[in-house]
Amino acid sequence: MSSVVLFVYKRSQQFAYEGVIRMDKKMLIENVVYLINKYLPERSDLVDLIMQDTRSVKYIMYQIEIGNERAYDEKDSELVQDIAFYYL
């Protein structure tokens, strides 16, 4: 007898069904812009870059990492992990 476990999991404002969590490009842009504004507010060029081309996410996340002088809070750390999982 097989059983299917269905659950709904909320993470980064994205709902999942049957354990599959997916961050779409719109969510990616919103999340990266949030991180840029919080950790590198002087780098508006990065906001323009992610809006033009989501493939630039690896470069942008690297810039946030090297330019950030403080530790991520727990929520932001999860967000960075989600972005890394889906787009890096």
Image: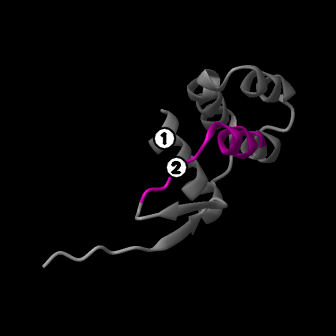
Residue 33 percent across, percent down from the top left: 77, 40
Residue tagged 1: 86
Who's the residue at 63% across and 22% down the image? 56
Who's the residue at 51% across and 35% down the image? 87
Residue 24 percent across, percent down from the top left: 61, 42
Who's the residue at 49% across and 55% down the image? 21
Name the element at disc 2: loop
Q: Establish if 66 lies above or below 38.
A: above
Q: Establish if 31 lies above or below 77.
A: above
Q: Which amino acid does label 2 sit on?
A: Arg
In the depicted view, which residue is nearer to us: 20 or 2? Answer: 2
Q: Is residue 22 left or right of residue 68?
A: left
Circles 2 and 1: CB atoms closer than 8 Å: yes
Residue 51 visible in the snapshot: yes
Whether residue 32 is in magenta: the answer is yes
Q: In which quarter of the image is residue 76?
A: bottom right
Q: How far apart are marks 2 and 1 (CA)?
A: 8 Å
- The disc, 2 or 1, on the residue closer to the chain's N-terminal end is 2
In the depicted view, which residue is nearer to us: 68 or 52? Answer: 52
Taken as a whole, is the magenta stretch helix, strand or loop? helix
Mark 1 Cα shell of 10 Å, populated few (<14), some (14-19), many (≥20)? few
In the depicted view, which residue is nearer to us: 85 or 60? Answer: 85
Span shown in magenta? 20-33
Residue 22's disc number: 2
Image quadrant occupied by the N terminus: bottom left
Who's the residue at 45% across and 43% down the image? 85
Residue 7 percent across, percent down from the top left: 44, 74
Q: Is residue 77 left or right of residue 37?
A: left
Residue 73 visible in the snapshot: no
Q: What residue type is labelled 1?
A: Tyr
Residue 32 percent across, percent down from the top left: 70, 40
Name the element at disc 1: helix
